[in-house]
């Protein structure tokens, strides 16, 4: 049993397959680009768990299959780590047709995608996301990047994969904290685009936390559908795509303010959504009952709802450094109504007020 979601950017089209057992299902691998060499890029945590299945599938389709195993962690999402992929590709005699397979979470997906965009000016790549966050967010939409010491995701490219295989079985080994972080990005799609989905998440949150297969399948498929629709309408973030950053302006300030890695990205986004909803309520887009409802859901997902006490001045200066800021003006993704969002500035006084009310 599997679902297919198609991403169509107007000049590129690819399928996201969602279901259990995909990595071991020959049908999921049919019709990929032909080449003499396939390279599986993973990390020291994920490769021992799932690379075997992938290598076995690829072995029936490619004359040669090799592996690159990167160090694990956001701290290694950098140019030096990406260069390990180039070293491998050149040593193995890779050519323009060589296909890269990114097996892992968002870090492996982002590095491998950017390596694929650069190597010989572009070789095909396939996303095999193994975290909830990667399945519902980072593997879809073609943003690829590595970090620079002076900024996260600062060096990168828009480069779409040829296919995305979201094998739900891989989520079984994900640590609970990482799973909750992924749920934040699932919840995000409700307030910005689909209130019926938010209702569904509320009704099925316990099933999701218990990682019940049917609940996971629906959550991943619907999240991918919404992201595919948004990316299809605005691949390079001229406008609409920015709504996917709901909760992220506050969230990035938490991550940067406490030092990256202290809170997981999804944890910061969960808390950030509570603050963004509260700010939206001050501006009349949603009511206080909606804010309470979202807060309760974020909390039930195992995510923090109380922001760290950074102090108003520090919050504002951190948010002014956000990529969405323009000429020192902080811009937030705010709810115009439940299920509808847009990016706008908000008065500093109101932002400070919201932070103070939440103990930030
Ligand atoms: P991650 O890739 O670091 O994975 C989290 C941890 O889980 C890692 O230690 C990883 O090795 C481990 N892991 C992965 N799959 C596992 C499994 N099945 N079982 C057990 N352990 C497993 O983190 P992430 O949350 O997946 O991704 C975060 C990254 O994604 C960030 O770098 C962020 O910038 C990026 N991102 C990109 C986009 C995009 O559009 N490209 C969107 C959102 C986030
Ligand atoms: Mg995010």
Image: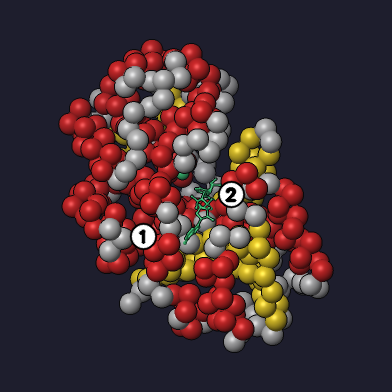
What residue would you read off at disc 2? 73
Image mark count: 2
- Left or right relative to 134: residue 205: left
Q: Residue at x 66, y 63 (%)?
A: 69
Q: Residues within 10 Å of mark 2 (few under 14, many from 20)?
A: some
269 relative to 60 in the view: left or right? left
Q: Secondary structure at mark 1?
A: helix
Residue 42 showing in the rendered view: yes
Q: Hey, which quadrant is residue 347 in on the image?
A: top left
* Rendered image quadrant of residue 359: top left
What residue is at 32 percent from the left and 25 percent from the top?
Answer: 279
- The response on whether ligand 1 sits within 8 Å of label 2 is yes
**The C terminus lies in quadrant:** top left
Q: Secondary structure at mark 2?
A: loop
Taking the image as shown, residue 7 lies to the left or right of residue 45, namely left
Q: Is 134 located above or below residue 344 in the figure?
A: below
Q: How is the image coloured?
A: secondary structure
Q: Is residue 238 above or below residue 171?
A: above
Taking 87 as reference, is 73 above or below it? above
Residue 36 in the image: state x and y as whole percent.
71, 81
Residue 86, percent from left and from top: 76, 60
Q: Position of residue 348 (x, y in %)?
A: 42, 15
Using the image, tell me which numbered label, if any, was put on residue 220.
1
At horizontal 37% and vertical 38% (from top left) the residue drawn is 270
The answer for how far apart the CA atoms under marks 2 and 1 are is: 23 Å
On the image, the x and y values in percent for residue 59 come to 62, 83
Report the front residue among 94 and 132.
132
């Amino acid at each position: 049993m599997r679902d297919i979601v198609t991403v169509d950017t107007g000049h590129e089209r690819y399928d996201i397959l969602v279901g259990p057992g995909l990595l071991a299902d020959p049908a999921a691998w049919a019709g990929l680009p032909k080449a003499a060499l396939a390279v599986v890029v993973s990390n020291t945590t994920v490769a021992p768990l799932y690379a075997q299945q992938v290598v076995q599938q690829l072995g029936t389709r490619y004359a040669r299959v090799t592996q690159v195993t990167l160090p694990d962690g956001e701290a290694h999402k950098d140019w030096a780590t990406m260069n390990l992929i180039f070293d491998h590709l050149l040593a193995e005699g890779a050519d323009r047709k060589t296909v890269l397979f990114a097996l892992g979470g968002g870090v492996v997906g982002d590095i491998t995608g950017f390596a694929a965009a650069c190597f010989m000016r572009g070789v095909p790549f396939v996303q095999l996301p193994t975290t909830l966050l990667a399945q519902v967010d980072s593997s879809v939409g073609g943003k690829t990047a590595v970090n620079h010491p002076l900024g996260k995701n600062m060096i990168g490219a828009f480069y779409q994969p040829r296919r995305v295989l979201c094998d739900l079985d891989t989520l079984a080994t994900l640590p609970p904290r990482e799973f909750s972080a992924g749920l934040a990005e699932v919840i995000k799609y409700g307030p910005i685009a689909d209130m019926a989905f938010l209702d569904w998440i509320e009704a099925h949150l316990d099933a999701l936390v218990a990682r019940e297969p049917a609940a996971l399948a629906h959550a991943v498929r619907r999240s991918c559908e919404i992201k595919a629709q948004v990316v299809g309408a605005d691949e390079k973030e001229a406008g609409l795509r920015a709504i996917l950053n709901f909760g992220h302006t506050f969230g990035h300030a938490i991550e940067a303010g406490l030092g990256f890695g202290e809170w997981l990205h999804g944890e910061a986004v969960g808390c950030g959504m509570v603050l963004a909803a509260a700010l939206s309520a001050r501006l009349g887009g949603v009511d206080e009952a909606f804010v309470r409802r979202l807060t309760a859901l974020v909390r039930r997902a195992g995510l923090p709802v109380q922001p760290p006490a950074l102090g108003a001045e520090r919050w504002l200066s951190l948010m002014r450094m956000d990529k969405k800021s323009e000429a020192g003006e902080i811009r937030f993704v705010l709810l115009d109504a439940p299920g509808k969002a847009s990016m706008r500035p908000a008065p500093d006084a109101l932002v400070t007020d919201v932070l103070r009310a939440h103990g930030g």
